[in-house]
Image (cartoon, rainbow, N blue to C red):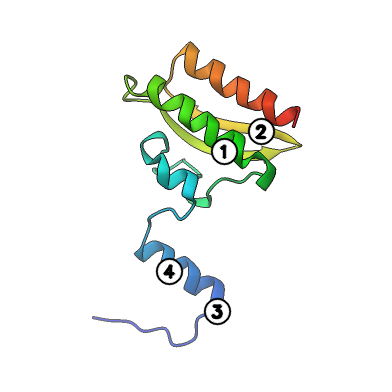
Amino acid sequence: MRFDIPMLDPSTKVLLAALRDPRPTDPIIRAHLNLFDFDPPSSMWFGLQVPDAWRDTIEQLCQRLLPLAADQADFRILSVKEKFGSLRIAYRGGTPAIEAEIERAKVEVFHA
């Protein structure tokens, strides 16, 4: 049985389109898909929630994490966002080297 809803507001149409095609559109995320987690409770479906000025730092962080995360099957980034003027990155798994690189990125955006 098929149900049609003739009147949808634009935001609902965008949401339904995202559900049909769940591929991320952010170029940084697309370039480093194996670093990011899209399963709940991840908020990566919202993309990188950071100012544009921080995007280069996030790209560099991803490039530095690739070799470190290659041996860590359980490492995934769950969210990347700005909160109260600081960079917040939630992740699971990882090593002290990965944690050091994430902390380095937080310092870099703080001094940018």
Question: What residue is shown with label 1?
Answer: 80
* Tag 1 near tag 3, CB within 8 Å: no
The kind of residue tagged 2 is Leu
The CA span between labels 4 and 2 is 30 Å
Answer yes or no: do the residues labelled 1 and 2 have beta carbons within 8 Å?
yes
Rounded to the nearest whole Å, what is the CA distance between mark 1 and mark 3?
Answer: 29 Å
- Which residue matches tag 2? 87
Tell me if mark 2 has few (under 14), some (14-19) or many (20+) residues whose alpha carbon lies within 10 angstroms of its own. Answer: many
Query: What label does residue 16 carry, if any?
Result: 4
**Which quarter of the image is occupied by the N terminus?**
bottom left
> What element does badge 3 sit on?
loop
Determine which residue is flagged by label 3: 9
- Give the image quarter of residue 89: top right
Q: Is residue 79 left or right of residue 38?
A: right
* Secondary structure category for the residue under label 2: strand
> Disc 1 versus disc 2: distance between alpha carbons?
7 Å
* Of pointers 4 and 2, the one earlier in the residue sequence: 4
| Spatial separation of the CA atoms under disc 1 and disc 4 | 24 Å
Q: In this picture, is 59 found above or below 3?
A: above
